[in-house]
Image (cartoon, grey):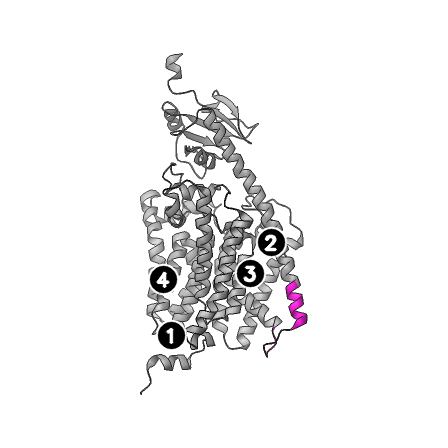
Amino acid sequence: MAQGTRPMLVGAGRLDEALVFGRSRRARGDGPLAAVAGAFALAQLLLVGPSMGLGWDEVVYVSQVAADAPAAFFSAPRARGVSLLVWPVASWSSSTTLLRFHLAVLSGLGLYLALRAWRGLFAARVLAGAGALFATLWVTLFYGPQAMPNLWVAYGALLCVGCFLRARADRLDKRPLWGVLAGAALMAWMRPTDAVWVTLPLLALVVQARHRRLAGALALGLAAGGIPWVIEAYVSFGGLRERLNEASRIQGDLGWNLAVDDQLRALVGSALCRPCDLATPHPAYYAWWFVLPLLAACGLAVAVRFGRTTRTLLPLACATTAAFPYLFLIGYAAPRFLLPAYLLLALPVADALRHLVTAPNGRLRPAAAAVVAFGLAGHLAVQYVVLDRIVDRTDSARGDWARSAAELHRLGVRPPCLLTGHHAIPVAHYTGCGSGAIGGHNANISRAGILRTARGVPVGALSVPGREPPRYASDWELHRLAGLVVRIAPAPGADDTA
């Protein structure tokens, strides 16, 4: 009776030594995690570069909080989390370089904090290895400094699942509950539907175990991140069902769609494969994709053998539910969609690799270590080749948008102004104009509205060379841009002076 509750729980628990020993041991485990996170942030700036222009989706998110550009149309599937993420910089500066530095540093910090939530659940070397495996994927490096939601869903998922396991192991420790809440809220702020898919195994467990505090933390986190999205559904889309239906329509009508082959083809460096009519790449580009689940299964077998099944099985289950809609319910592919699954899988994969190269007495297995090292070296080489390719291609495309904007300025299309047509959203942002569309996923204006606007400010209709322009712009003055043509409406008042 003289013993306190906490020592009894520690003595009876099944957490690793790093949870049982003091703070000094945990502090020593932070060094490798910080090194991996710092190297990840630095690698983004060196390999992707801070000068890359904003992409189409980034323009939408950044323009919502930018002080010097009109907000682009915000479609139903999107959530406001990314806009909040970039607000500290984008609200007062138009510097893309500064924004890239901001996001690279934040993504490095996010990786560190997400991995740190797992101290004691896995050895420090396993956590550092998992972080390194994830951080060296081309898709992780490419999207680290970009204003996109998927990497942050991944961080929220890892934080939420790690703290969930901690809270489940010690019901009297309230600190992990805050981590569960924060991780769930982060996911829901970024992509509410993804947050639901990721947390399905967690919700099933809390219902089965009747863990009220844990259920409350998880529900409160999902609500904190998701309620603004629900409120916006009623304010701007006519209701939650209407927003979900519109989001499904924009994404190609969600339903049974086998997209596994699309995701495989996109691994060659396609940011968006829609329609995914690329040729199947050489096996060198996607071999790691098939090795990944095998190593994860090996990690689960190791966990079962050593009596720590739950802490490996749960991230595997959450990775599966996170990946399911993007592999089987959507008719196109983007590699970034699977970032949450990759990060959750990295833990059992790193644990499996450690087991393969280390003997039970702790000594290195030279032959196994050589094979693993050779495989990892080839894997890293492929990741770098794909990253270099997509960075070059992206820089070129976004450079064309910037050059088009400069030419539009020379032609007199300056803010306030309006651009419509092909690639109107990104080119308009680079030009400082508003963007409009009379049809498609981003419809936000009518033909009459465009013509009415043209009476007061410069208006341009963008199109691909050789394509017929919209009827309302058929007699506007034609000019050639970088990969585009623009028809510019007569200057306001021109008819009066003729």
The answer to whether marks 1 and 4 mark residues whose Cβ atoms lie closer than 8 Å is no
Element type where label 3 sits in the image: helix
Tell which circle, 1 or 3, labels the residue nearer the N-terminal end. Answer: 3
Q: Secondary structure at mark 1?
A: loop
Q: Which residues are magenta?
A: 358-373
Judging by the rendered image, the residue that carries numbered circle 1 is 170
The N terminus appears in which quarter of the rendering? bottom left
Graded by Cα atoms within 10 Å as few (under 14), some (14 to 19) or many (20 or more), the crowding at tag 2 reads many
Q: Which residue is mark 4?
A: 181
- Return the disc, 4 or 3, that comes first in the chain's sequence: 3
Q: In the rendered structure, which amino acid carries the disc numbered 2?
A: Gln
Q: How many marks?
A: 4
Residue 395, magenta (yes or no): no
Which of marks 3 and 2 precedes in the sequence? 3
Q: Position of residue 56 (x, y in %)?
A: 47, 41
User: Which residue is the site of mark 3?
Assistant: 133
